[in-house]
């Protein structure tokens, strides 16, 4: 059985995080909370890599479309006037395409982060998915103010610095997807004792 201090999660620094020069800052925030990076690589993703990362099933796309509709409703905007449709599946497919375009627009940094409750800790440090709702002190709260309303109006994905696995099962799947058979490094940080 894996020691609780060895929980691993997956993190992907997105194009805006790379373009804003935040790679070191993201890593620093994890390391200062006693998490350690055990795998790290910068790469230029292909459309196929990103297409395989995001779900393709109708339920997921409709959920994405419904989130888009709720943003339009919240701000009393007309999705038909702006996007040409109010059909959840069509909107979900549109937003998914924006995501693929965004994620292939620049290099990404993929990493595996390990430590006590790594999945929850990384998400706490990152802040909520939507930067405008993220508290100061989180990565998204400190370095982005983007929102779905602005992104939808500009027909693009929300720029939110990074992706972090939501669950241990998702982390395991994403680590396998993005790193394949490459094994994370095993090392002790200065002063670390796993006994």
Image (spheres, rainbow, N blue to C red):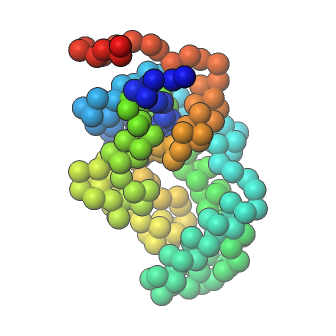
Q: Is residue 111 visible?
A: no
Residue at x 45%, y 23% (from the top left corner)? 3
Q: Quadrant of residue 176?
A: top right
Q: Is residue 188 above or below residue 179?
A: above
Q: Residue furthest right?
A: 58
Quarter of the image where the C terminus is located: top left
**Where does the image place residue 188, in percent across and percent down from the top left?**
34, 13
Q: Viewed as shown, does residue 121 lie left or right of 192? A: right
**Where does the image place residue 117, in percent across and percent down from the top left?**
41, 37
Quarter of the image where the N terminus is located: top right
Q: Viewed as shown, does residue 46 lie left or right of 5? A: right
Q: Is residue 99 above or below residue 111?
A: below
Q: Viewed as shown, does residue 39 lie left or right of 126? A: right
Q: Nearer the viewer, residue 190 or 109?
A: 190
Q: Nearer the viewer, residue 101 or 41?
A: 41
Residue at x 59%, y 33% (from the top left corner)? 172
Q: Is residue 175 visible?
A: yes
Residue at x 72%, y 69% (from the top left corner)? 89
Q: Is residue 122 above or below residue 2?
A: below
Residue at x 52%, y 69% (from the top left corner)? 152
Q: How many marks?
A: 0
Q: Is residue 178 above or below residue 151?
A: above
Q: Viewed as shown, does residue 5 lie left or right of 166? A: left
**Where does the image place residue 126, in percent across and percent down from the top left?**
36, 47
**Where does the image place residue 25, in percent across and percent down from the top left?**
28, 36
Q: Quadrant of residue 18?
A: top left
């Amino acid at each position: 059985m894996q020691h609780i201090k060895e929980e691993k999660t997956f993190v992907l620094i997105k194009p805006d995080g790379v373009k804003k020069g935040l790679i070191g800052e993201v890593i620093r925030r994890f390391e200062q909370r006693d998490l350690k990076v055990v795998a790290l690589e910068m790469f230029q993703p292909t459309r196929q890599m990103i297409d395989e990362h995001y779900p393709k099933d109708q339920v997921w796309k409709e959920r994405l479309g419904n989130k888009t509709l709720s943003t339009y409703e919240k701000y009393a905007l007309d999705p038909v006037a702006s996007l040409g449709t109010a059909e959840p599946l069509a909107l979900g497919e549109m937003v998914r395409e924006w995501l693929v375009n965004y994620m292939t627009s620049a290099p990404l940094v993929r990493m595996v982060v390990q430590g006590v409750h790594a999945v929850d800790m990384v998400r706490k440090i990152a802040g909520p998915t939507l930067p405008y709702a993220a508290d100061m002190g989180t990565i998204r709260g400190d370095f982005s103010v983007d929102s779905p309303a602005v992104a939808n109006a500009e027909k693009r994905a929300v720029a939110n610095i990074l992706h972090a696995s939501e669950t241990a099962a998702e982390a395991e799947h994403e680590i396998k997807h993005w790193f394949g058979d490459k094994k994370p490094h095993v090392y002790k940080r200065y002063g670390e004792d796993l006994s």
